[in-house]
Amino acid sequence: MAEGYMIKRPIEELVRSRISVRNYKNADIEQEVFIKLNRFIGEVLKKYNSNIRIELINMESIKRDKDVKLGTYGVIRGTSHFIAAAVKKKDMNLVDLGLIIEHIVLYATELGLGTCYLAGTFKRSEFSKALELAEDEVLPMIISIGYPKDGLDFIGSFFKLAAGSKKRKPWSELFFNETFERALTEAEAGDFANALEMVRLAPSASNRQPWRIVKEGRKFYFYISRNAVYSKALGFDTQMIDMGIAMSHFQLALEEKGMKGQWCKDNEDLDVSINNITYLISWIND
Ligand SMILES: Cc1cc2nc3c(=O)[nH]c(=O)nc-3n(C[C@H](O)[C@H](O)[C@H](O)COP(=O)(O)O)c2cc1C
């Protein structure tokens, strides 16, 4: 990526400090911050050669001093700024969307912005209009952005805010050693332990953390443990976005350490003994 529009802070610091921010300061986002964010969006889309359309939109119709009831859960207050993503219906790839957009969320965190993914029943028609959604496009989710009400200072308040708010499943429920029968310990994960910890801390719809990973040497098989009811309720498979988010944390944490690898599909028949767990993709480390 072009110099100047890269994530510069350590991934771990960004992952640990990001939390869903639903209360904003009712302040405009500075022009300079907008420009940086916009350039970064362009760079990430180029890096992944993606035709997803990601735009920053200011919903003038939203009164920032009122609660915006955006969905079945969660209320956003104090911002009218959003990141919205339009995806082509025919090649709707929610995994790619999650992978790409989480880079942007982490960069926004670096810029001191708070964010919150919103895939619930937000006013899709208004956002679709603002985004000039084409016939063949859909809008699976938006992300609110703005300065967090409870403190702007990155290191101080953000970290304090984050402390205790990350309720996540333990390693033993998420990561496995060669087979689902054996939990993977941090010691066994070795050089990969940090990247897996970054996956564990990732945000997910309703905090369901659908990712399950089996390590086999330098290969990591990513599986999705679906919650069927939730997927159906929204009309979009939001848990696929969650998977993309987890992949971005894993990849960024490894890349930062100079560890290279690639995503590929190669393990469709790996024996799965637990119900409702489906293979998605593998990371093969060089
Ligand atoms: C794909 C996706 C969709 C989400 N949709 C909503 C939503 O509609 N409303 C909301 O308040 N939060 C939503 N969230 C935020 C999650 O509830 C939140 O990430 C999770 O509870 C973990 O908390 P944290 O982000 O503070 O770490 C969503 C998150 C993701 C990843």
Image (cartoon, helix red, strand yellow):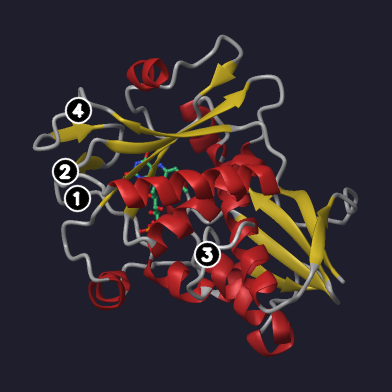
Q: Label 4 vs label 3: CA separation?
A: 30 Å
Residue 21 can be seen in this image: yes
Three-letter amino acid code at the position of disc 3: Ile
Mark linked to residue 189: none
Q: Does residue 261 appear left or right of residue 186 in this picture?
A: right
Res 88 quadrant in image:
top right
Label 1: which residue?
23
Dot 1 or dot 3, earlier in sequence: 3
The image shows a total of numbered marks equal to 4
Element class at badge 1:
loop
Q: What residue sits 16% from the left and 62% below the top?
A: 150
Q: Label 2 vs label 3: CA separation?
A: 26 Å
Residue 276 can be seen in this image: no
Q: Is residue 31 above or below residue 282?
A: above
Mark linked to residue 7: 3
Dot 2 or dot 3, earlier in sequence: 3
